[in-house]
Image (cartoon, rainbow, N blue to C red):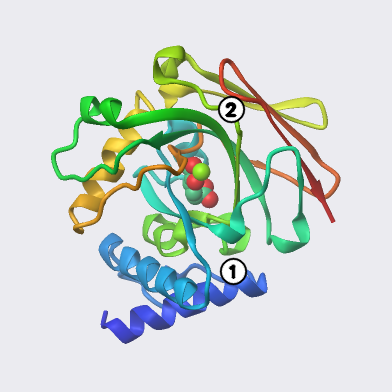
């Protein structure tokens, strides 16, 4: 596909996000043979449009890194995208479901680096050396696609369903946490709706950062320092509606509490 066609799709997806209009999968309506590479080009064009409109990138994010998520969405390859400044919700605050199409929440471990990391050739040891600290997070996803259904290129082009993110303020050192055994329990209105464990994320959540560094490295880009990078949902994602009280408890990482409102 040529650049103009990819840009038109980027604009279409961007408008869907901003106007809260659900759309059919672009692999049905606009680009039946869309490759993952072209889908990332669409994502990049959309990122540029957001930057041009004055939005800022907050942090990169990983997705579809765990079996529960791959099985829930029926897409088996990890992906990455970007959380923007307007998506961040403070811990212990509320967010309005009226600003979303069909929001879902999922627990994630986030990693903050002390120095940027650049692939290719990055290993898990390189990641460990560059870690500043670990925080808990919850992603508030919102696919722009009808019925929350997509294929691998669709979800890449749609900036990996990014729309909301909450990070805890409690910083935990890498040597004070057993990342693979870190457990998250997600409750909605007091009822357990999902549970996940760190090792579900690519066998070790740090592998998500390895993947990101090597993917970005292949494009001449690096993983930034100083921002929390979500390593991907540890459990399936759970739909939320107005008046839901969302509580996520972690073994070692900080608790997250948010409220969904009208
Ligand atoms: C796609 C984004 C996946 C994760 O953590 O697995 C993702 C989706 O499920 O909407 O962010
Ligand atoms: Mg996620």
Which one is in front, 98 or 90? 90
Taking 94 as reference, is 43 left or right? left
The quarter of the displayed image where residue 125 is located? top left
Q: Please tell me how crowded label 1 is: few (under 14), some (14-19), or many (20+) other residues with Cα within 10 Å.
A: many
Q: Is residue 73 visible?
A: no
Decide: few, some or many residues near mark 2? Use Cα within 10 Å; few <14, some 14-19, many ≥20: few
Tag 1 secondary structure: helix
Q: Is residue 29 left or right of residue 119?
A: right
Return the residue found at the far left: 121
Determine the residue positioned at 39% across, 66% down: 43
Q: Is residue 208 above or below residue 148?
A: above
> Mark 2 — residue?
170
User: Which residue is at 68% across, 56% downward?
Assistant: 102
Q: Say if 13 sits above or below 210 in the image.
A: below
x, y percent for residue 197: 50, 21
Q: CA distance from mark 2 to mark 1?
A: 31 Å
First-in-chain label (2 vs 1)? 1
Which of label 2 and label 1 is nearer to you? 2
Q: Which residue is mark 1?
A: 17
Give the number of marks.
2
């Amino acid at each position: 596909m040529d650049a103009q066609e990819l840009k038109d799709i980027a604009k279409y997806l961007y408008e869907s996000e901003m106007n809260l209009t659900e759309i059919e999968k672009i692999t049905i309506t606009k680009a039946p043979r869309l490759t993952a590479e072209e889908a990332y080009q669409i994502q990049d064009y959309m990122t540029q449009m957001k930057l041009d409109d004055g939005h800022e990138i907050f942090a990169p994010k990983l997705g579809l890194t765990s079996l529960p998520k791959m099985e829930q969405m029926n897409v088996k390859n990890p992906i990455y995208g970007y959380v923007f400044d307007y998506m961040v919700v403070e811990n212990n605050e509320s967010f309005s479901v009226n600003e979303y199409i069909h929001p879902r929440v999922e627990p994630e471990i986030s990693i903050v680096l002390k120095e940027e990391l650049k692939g290719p050739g990055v290993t898990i040891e390189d990641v460990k050396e560059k870690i500043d600290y670990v925080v808990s997070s919850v992603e508030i996803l919102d696919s722009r696609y009808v019925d929350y259904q997509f294929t691998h290129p669709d979800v890449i082009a749609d900036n990996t369903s990014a729309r909301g993110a909450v990070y805890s303020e409690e910083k935990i050192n890498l040597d004070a946490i057993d990342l693979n055994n870190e457990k998250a329990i997600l409750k909605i209105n007091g009822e357990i709706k999902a549970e996940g464990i760190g090792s579900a994320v690519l066998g070790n959540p740090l592998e998500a950062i390895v993947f990101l560094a090597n993917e970005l490295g292949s494009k001449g880009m690096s993983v930034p320092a100083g921002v929390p990078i979500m390593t991907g949902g540890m459990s399936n994602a759970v739909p939320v509606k107005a008046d839901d009280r969302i509580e996520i408890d972690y073994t070692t990482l900080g608790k997250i509490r948010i409220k969904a409102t009208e």
